[in-house]
Image: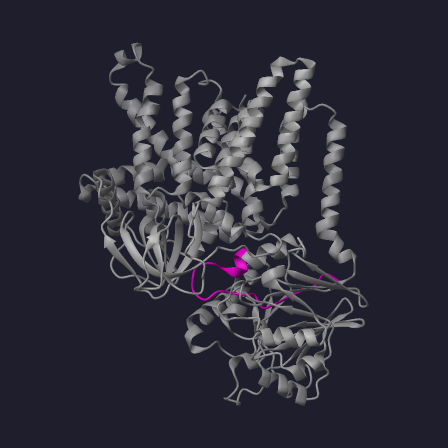
Amino acid sequence: MPICVCLLAGQASVLFISTKIFILTLSVVLLSICALVWRRNRALILPVIVLAAFAVAGRLLGWTVFNQKIVLPQLSDTSSPYMCDGVVEGVPQAFENGWRVDVSLAGCSGGVAGKIEPAKGKVRLFTGGFSGELNSGDSVRFLARFSKPRRFKNPGSFDYPLYLLTQGIGATGALVGPNWIVKTGEGNTLWPARIVSKARGKIDGAISSSADGDVAGILKAVIIGKRDGISPKTVDAFSKTGLAHLLSISGLHVGFVAAIMFLFIRFLLGWWPRLSLFWPLQRISAIASLPVVWFYVAIAGFPVSAVRAAIMLTVFLVSLFSLWRRDLLSALATAVFTILVVSPSSLFSVSFQLSAVSVFAIIVVTPLIIKKFDRLPKARHISEIVAVTIAATLGSAPIVAYTFHFVSVIGLFSNIVAVPFTGALLMPFAISASVMSLIYKPLAVIIWKVAALATGVLLGFAQNLNRYGSVFVVSWAPSLFEVVLLYAAIAIVFFWNKLSYKRVVVGALSAFLVFDIAYWHAGAVAGRALQVTFLDVGHGDSIIVRFPNGHVTLIDGGGTKGGDFDIGENVVSPALLRMGIHRVNDLILTHPHHDHYKGLAAVAERFDVRVLYTNGTDAPDEELVSWEEFLGRIRGIDASIAPIVGSQISAPAFSMEEGGARLDVYPRLASDLAILDPNDTSLVVKISYGDRSFILMGDLEQMGERILLESGSKMPADVMKIGHHGSETSSSKDFLSAIHPSIAVISLGEGNQYGVPDEVVLGRLNEIGANIYRTDIDGAVTVRTDGKSLVVDTFVKRGL
């Protein structure tokens, strides 16, 4: 029953992804019905008909959610600003250089003077700031440029559009100016909303009066869902130790609140023992805790993960009164089914996946682990805590690795310590202090200080564990196939005694594992080929050079100006891991512009980089703060920074040979030429292997190209990374004629505002007969050579 319901619920959300899959599945179902009718097997006819009905319903639900989630027919021009009205949803979130605000649209118009027409959907706005204060439910008017969220087209890339869609967001917008969002009406007009808003403000103020720094940030995060007070270092420490789930309100925190309230209500009801003669006190206590749970979710601003957890808990507890009260799997399946019917896109939410899989693993695997503990000295409560932690960790580990690209081996130990500590000390004090903040603030401050002490202990535990246990954090970005293999291996271990055909199953799993390792990890090195991959990092450059002997050099790392999205952490690093690269030997920064250097810091930290080669100049004045922060992160991992400076531009100032391939770096132009654009200080990199060569131009402009030609440098190359993203100010006709590449790669952002690549540049490349590849269209472009032939592979297959 539970498995059947889970499958049906899954179909109700998945089958709409591919029309072909839907038609194929529906055809198989119909043929099965015909076969069953023919054989008169009436017992199976009804389940098959139900399966077909769910398939059709899933198709309709999927179409509704994914095609009508945002309806903005008038927003056809993404280059022009639009004036829109809407309502703020949730709590505005602060990040490094601004704010993020989610708004449900009511109407939009083109420009300031246009007529506002009805519009539907939810958008995420980014702004450097706004005047006054915005709260959930406030009516606003804003002027913004919209764009559709995009996915970086690289191996292992995070699907950002799908992530936003699971939150109901269909577009993103950048405010024209920091003051171009104004409040037009107060929200929270209903008295329940006003109560929640007022309570949230009181709790926020009480925490600020009792703690500061990361301690206050953690308390606000777990009680009111406000995470902007936690430093990036602390977030990283909790992530690497497997404790990141403690910093955001999720199913765990909802469970803590429910358990605490259950125990408290059960304690109160225990003063009237005669009630147990008429009512089942435990079930009454469980149901009575639900209003408090939902108030907690409201205080937190209704984060999506907490709402899903509260729905799951509500259905789960209500089922205790049904015929399923002893069938926990059926209760879980019902909760999953309810959530997916209400919000089909939840299936693609990582928080929903982790919650469902963790609870499933706890229900199924925990009893098996406890049986193993029966052989040890009796310590029932400790063994149950350990068993639940092991089950939840193993159940969620494959999804965590697939999504966040690492496996924290030490996470098992950290959760065994931190989760009970949080549930037994931190959360009870924090919840008590929250309640008291609404009643009597002086006493609340005292309780908050106790909660702050507990939070400080948890923070110190995570920081020290991260400092001394980093060796137990393994970077890994498994494919979906490898995730399936992991779950198969876990199932085999725990159900070994019940497994039929053990040798066949183990043999098949081993064969798949060997094939996977050979394909992803051994193939590239065994092939003795030079491989150069031009990543899609939006409007920027990032190039992975994998030499025939496995040595890896990363040239530039992409980056965005402002915002809290780290290209290095979220785009470049996953691509490296997905390509089977776990060590980057050195970095080369062509020049210090944000779209080239900002992503390198995260790569250096994760891949144990020892040296960064630069052109020896500093970033422009407007980027000095980000530049100094970047250099600080590089120095923080004890990596050396080596400027490449040469006396003449006609000869390489730096060279390396690895596996028979040679990399030469030509120095920047003379720094005393003040008329030069900073782009003309770009290092030019040439890579040679056998009869084939690559030249990578950074952002070199036409003046730099002319000086390079006049220096007498030998420039011809088979593959050319076009300078400055295909801008007209680069790639002069004479320079392209001198290089005469057969393959030209342009790295640029999809739908960028700079109008690149320029049609003039594309025309020049066509004139010399170059095959043009673009990262905005083709995604990651990989060129392999054995020294003789050239093979080009793109992430987005042409013609598909």
Q: Quadrant of residue 775?
A: bottom right
Q: Residue at x 58, y 20 (%)?
A: 47
Left or right, 794 with respect to 370, comes to right
Query: In this view of the protein, can residue 408 be seen by the observer?
Result: no
Nearest to the observer: residue 544 or residue 333: 333
Above or below for 730 versus 287: below
Q: Residue at x 52, y 74 (%)?
A: 592
Above or below for 193 versus 276: below
Q: Position of residue 343 (x, y in %)?
A: 45, 37
Q: Is 567 covered by the magenta stretch?
A: yes
Nearest to the observer: residue 90 or residue 364: 90
Q: Position of residue 792 (x, y in %)?
A: 72, 62
Q: Quadrant of residue 43?
A: top right
Q: Position of residue 260 (x, y in %)?
A: 34, 31
Left or right, 609 with respect to 793, comes to left
Extent of the magenta region: 549-570
Above or below for 787 versus 260: below
Q: Residue at x 47, y 53 (%)?
A: 236
Q: Residue at x 57, y 36 (%)?
A: 15
Query: In this view of the protein, can residue 700 be seen by the observer?
Result: yes
Q: How many marks?
A: 0
Left or right, 787 with respect to 23, comes to right
Residue extending furthest toward the top:
277
Q: Position of residue 698 (x, y in %)?
A: 60, 74
Above or below for 668 versus 749: below
Nearest to the observer: residue 266 or residue 350: 350
Q: Main secondary structure of the magenta part?
A: loop
